[in-house]
Image (cartoon, rainbow, N blue to C red):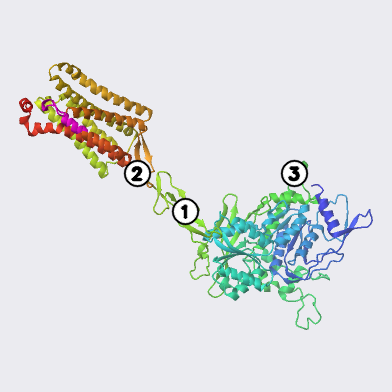
Amino acid sequence: MRSSLNSYYCILNLLLYCSSSSSLYSSSCHLQGQFHLNELHKTGDVVLGGLFQVHFFSDYSDLSFTSEPPQPICHGFDITGFRQAQTMAFAIDEINRNPNLLSNVTLGYSLYDNCLQLGIGFRGALSLASGQKKEVTIEETCEGTPPVVAIVGDSSSTRSIAISTVLGLYRVPLVSYFATCSCLSDRQKFPSFFRTIPSDSFQVSAMIQILKHFGWTWTGLLISDDDYGVHSARSFKSLMGPASGGCLAYTEVLPWGKDQAELRRIVDVMRESTARVVIVFAHESHMLNLMEEVVRQNLSGLQWIASEAWTSAAVLQTPHFMPYLGGTLGIAIRRGEITGLRDFLLKTQPDLHYNSSHGNSMVNQFWEQMFQCRFSPPVAGWLEAGGALCTGQEVLENMIEEEFMDISDLRPEYNVYKAVYAIAYALDDMLQCEPGRGPFSGDTCAHLQRLEPWQLVYYLEKVKFTTSFGDHVSFDENGDALPIYDIMNWAWLPDGSTHVQNVGEVKRSAFKGEELTLDEKKLFWNFQSKKPPQSVCSESCPPGTRMARKKGQPECCFDCIPCSERKISNTTNSRECISCPEDFWSSPQRDHCVPKKTEFLSYHEPLGICLATATVVGTFLCFVVLAIFIHHLNTPIVRANNTELSFLLLVSLKLCFLCSLLFIGQPRTWTCQLRHAAFGISFVLCISCILVKTMVVLAVFRASKPGGEASMKWFGAAQQRGTVLVLTSVQAAICTVWLVSASPAPHKNVHYHNDKIVYECVIGSTIGFGVLLGYIGLLAILSFLLAFLARNLPDSFNEAKFITFSMLIFCAVWVAFIPAYINSPGKYADAVEVFAILASSFGLLVALFGPKCYIILLRPERNTKKAIMGRNSRS
């Protein structure tokens, strides 16, 4: 980079403005021609350049570099543009008076008028970069301060792109105060471009923040046919996606001229669209032409959102347009206050000694515009026609009401002010460098007499300062300043006047991101309801529904589809319904998940209460029978029916009744493991007692016959107990193996019912459960067969009829239980099993002990040995 100053200063002269002498050893070059532009100059040790729009129009169109290029004739003086140029002059004057900034260095300026033309602005920039000396001596080093160290400008994105493309080759800093195109943030294409105005990408982002705030998801977009509009539209389409939740109903390009047919077509599109919000990225001239057509067609009821290019356009704030533009929300450049600017403007004086064959200076033209006079008659007879000559003695304070003196709304001017100070602080930082500790190669520092443009670019990238208005100024890696915009609202007052009021701001900070602040109480809405309008393609989908995009239409156009069962949406405009957790179910409104109802055989429901009551009754009856038997222990009927087995049978029946309680209540691990084991062992104990009783009856009958005494030795008391114990132990072993290998466990079954959780005990092993039931069934069938064989024995030795009947009841109940159990879901399977346990237990209790209790309690005369034997004798 050491030779960049040589290349920038010499090559611009050699290639762009000068033609080499025909001599091979020539040491100088000459300008092919000079551009006599509207200008404003002040000498200094270091000169800053500036490009401003001081005229609206120009008759200039030739872009050739001939020996005598035609000079532009600019007209339509722009007071605001001149005030911006004067703001730069004021900022430089203020810096020169500041002893703490650039001490011992005097800043100067060279300001040119671009006349709103690319060619004029481009030539002005090249004139600033290369200087206007007619002859340049080529030295080996080309050392010295450049003609300008940096340029403030331009006000247009298109002109800034063209100028920065060339000046960027030589790293000449260009600090714009009004060029907003997001394309200028490309550091590869524009390495030396900076700006003190936010880029359009942030302006678009700021507008989207406003759209989100008011819920406007369906908007129209109108753009100008230039870099400003095209890049803004590109940013809108990239940012208004699924994340922002907004869509563009249409995008139309506004023509530059008064193309009535095209304007009529665009207004027709706006009328037919359902979008009530219209965003316009265009210039004042575009809006003027468009609004004329809007008024002609009487298209009202729209909410306009203005870009910074026309937010403050007074030409649109007229009674003619305000019925349609009232309530407009606009993005405006940050307003600032510049102390002392008004006094500086009042000191503006014309140059009475200015002499140019091509026109007057900027100040002289301003003077002529303000006082409607001329320093020299433009045509013969002009004085006779009533024209006045300017004397330079006119009093500017008498024009205090003019636009030039209105500094209450400084926006572009504030950006100019910040741009000048950014360059000044960068120069000051550069001059503060200590030799040997510099940031450049070899720890060197930059010097004014050997200043290379890229060195100033380095310091501009690092600059940080705070304005007197309190705003922090610095540039990011793309050369963009910290973005901040004011939000303006066009209020149409009852007296017909217009008031453009500041209603908020949107800014971006490194810590909080984008922040939107709005004072909604101050907002004026140009609608009968005095409320913000609705602008949506489809109404929001409430919670409980999801959006289904309409085929062939933008994303914002959708139908609302209710969520299916077990799915919910708890936010507005949900794209998908989310599934509820396994233990939850969707509410009737499908907007939240509710815990599923739990179902199990409970003590708190009628069915559970009835079964528990029956269990208690059965247990109590067992106690009663046992008490009766104990009380009448020595009576013949008790002693004749194998007292010990009868007592053991009653205990087992009591256990059978009680085990049914394990099936009632919420299943837990211990109840699941215990219920079937207790059921199996209790019933095997009960049936084992019955089987042994039956076998004893048969043995006694055989022993009563001659020669049958020996059969009783196999059915003594010890053998009876042992048989019962062995048979019960087999069931206990089956239960133990089952519990160890595949233990039953509680389970939440969600398949029986969609909206319920059925708590149940899974048996773990179907084989284990089958063997348990099969063993009980085997003993029951065996008991039934033996009892059936012994049914015709004499009554004095015989319980077989009662055992036969009880086993018949038992087998019938459990045969019916199997299909009923299999086909009963959830708690009803438990209820069926409990019912089978109770039914079989009651059957055994009643069939075996009912007749005996009847005799003991109601027919005591029959409870004698004689009665029993006599009945047998009669038989």
Amino acid tagged 1: Thr
Residues at marks 3 and 2, CA–CA distance in whole angstroms: 78 Å
SS class of the residue under badge 1?
loop
> Badges 1 and 3: C-beta atoms under 8 Å apart?
no
Q: Are marks 3 and 2 in contact (CB under 8 Å)?
A: no
**Discs 1/3, front:** 1
- Of mark 2 and mark 1, the one earlier in the sequence is 1
Could you tell me residue 187's position as x and y percent? 71, 51
Q: Which residue is mark 2?
A: 598
What residue is drawn where x is 25% and y is 38%? 835
Is residue 218 within the magenta segment? no
Secondary structure state at the residue bearing disc 2: strand
Does residue 867 appear in this view? yes
On the image, the x and y values in percent for residue 396 come to 70, 72
Classify mark 2: residues with Cα within 10 Å, few (<14), some (14-19) or many (20+): some
Disc 2 and disc 1 in contact, CB within 8 angstroms? no
Assign the C terminus to one quadrant of the image.
top left
Compared with 496, 130 (above or below) is: above
Q: Nearer the viewer, mark 3 or mark 2?
A: 2
Tell me where residue 418 appears, x and y as whole percent. Answer: 67, 57
Q: Which residues are magenta?
A: 791-807
Which circle's residue, 1 or 3, is located before the other in the chain? Answer: 3
Residue 745, by quadrant, is top left
Name the kind of residue labelled 2 in the image: Thr
Residue furthest bottom in the image = 384
Crowd band around label 3 with a 10 angstrom C-alpha radius: few (<14), some (14–19), many (20+): some
Q: Residue at label 3? A: 438
Residue at numbered disc 1? 571
Real-space CA distance between mark 1 and mark 3, rounded to the nearest whole angstrom: 58 Å
